[in-house]
Image (cartoon, rainbow, N blue to C red):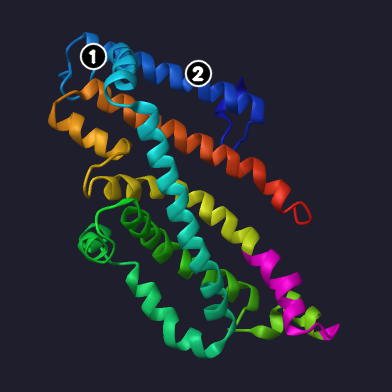
Amino acid sequence: MLDLLKFGGSLSNKKATITGIVGGIVLLCLWYLITITGFISPKILPNPVDVVLSVPELIKERELFSNIWYTISLNLKGYFYALLIAIPLGFIIGIYPLPRAMFQKPFEAIRFLPLPVTSGIFVTIFGLGFDMKASFLAFGILIYILPVVTQRVLDLQNVDNPTDNVYIQTANTIGMSNWQKFRYVYWPYVMEKVYGDIRSLVAISYTYVTIAENINKEGGIGATINTLTRQSDMSSVYCLLFIIIIIGIIQDIIFKKLEPIIFKHHC
């Protein structure tokens, strides 16, 4: 019990899981107590029981499972497009001095673009279909992950003081070719670091997804939330918000479980 209050202490995975569950139950009870006292209007914070009871209606009237799949598939397609471009381009910019000098700073600057204002450009190019939303989402992920890949390469190379780079110096000493250095040094080192960055981006990506889905509201959890909010159906809105959280948690667990499999030689 004292471990829970130890300054700078830590818990075993089992204790941390149990404590987290207890914390969730405590928050749920507080939420319920606040709503039954009328301290906060149900138009702002609905009763958790009403949130749960909204599920059947969402399934029947709002095509819940179809919208969940729409959101997940949009997120996956956006990730695929973004990584397909960001990973090779990030390596090229990081490894070679000329593209690094030309493009590193501009790509870093693009990150400051407010993403919603670029939606009109994607509508003009791709129309109002699913591919437009996937491309818009991919752009949002790309401008985040591309500079990260480049920086991970630079961290490996230690360009400010290359003589301190043990990995690269060892590769040069044993006479590795450029391809061998990329295959056995750059790729495993950088991708193991970037994998964690991609995993962290999961939470941000669902923000981008809901923005994309609201461009023409043809489907998805984000578009449904927007419609229900305008109808003041807050119980259903909260239910969908929790579904997004659950999807994100499941996706994060999958990423975590896959990591030691993908990087089994480095874990």
In this rendering, does residue 244 appear at all?
no
Residue 63 screen position, x and y as percent = 32, 27
Residue drawn at x 57%, y 53% is 196
Residue 26 screen position, x and y as percent = 42, 17
Quick check: 145 above or below 12? below
Asked where in the image residue 111 lies, by quadrant, the reply is bottom left
Quick check: 18 above or below 8? above
Q: Which residue is mark 1?
A: 35
Q: Which of the pair 136/143 is nearer the observer?
A: 136
Q: Count residues near mark 1 (Cα–Cα under 10 Å), then give few for <14, some for 14-19, many for 20+.
A: some
Residue 201 screen position, x and y as percent = 46, 52
Q: Which of the pair 37/55 is nearer the observer?
A: 55
Query: Which region of the structure is painted magenta?
Result: 173-190
Residue 178 on the magenta span: yes
Provide the secondary structure element on which disc 1 rests.
Answer: helix
Quick check: 164 above or below 203? below
Provide the secondary structure element on which disc 2 rests.
Answer: helix
Q: Which of the pair 233/265 is nearer the observer?
A: 233
Left or right of 202 on screen, residue 152: right
Residue drawn at x 19%, y 33% is 227
Q: CA distance from mark 1 to mark 2?
A: 20 Å
Q: Which of the pair 8/194 is nearer the observer?
A: 194
Q: Which mark is residue 22?
A: 2
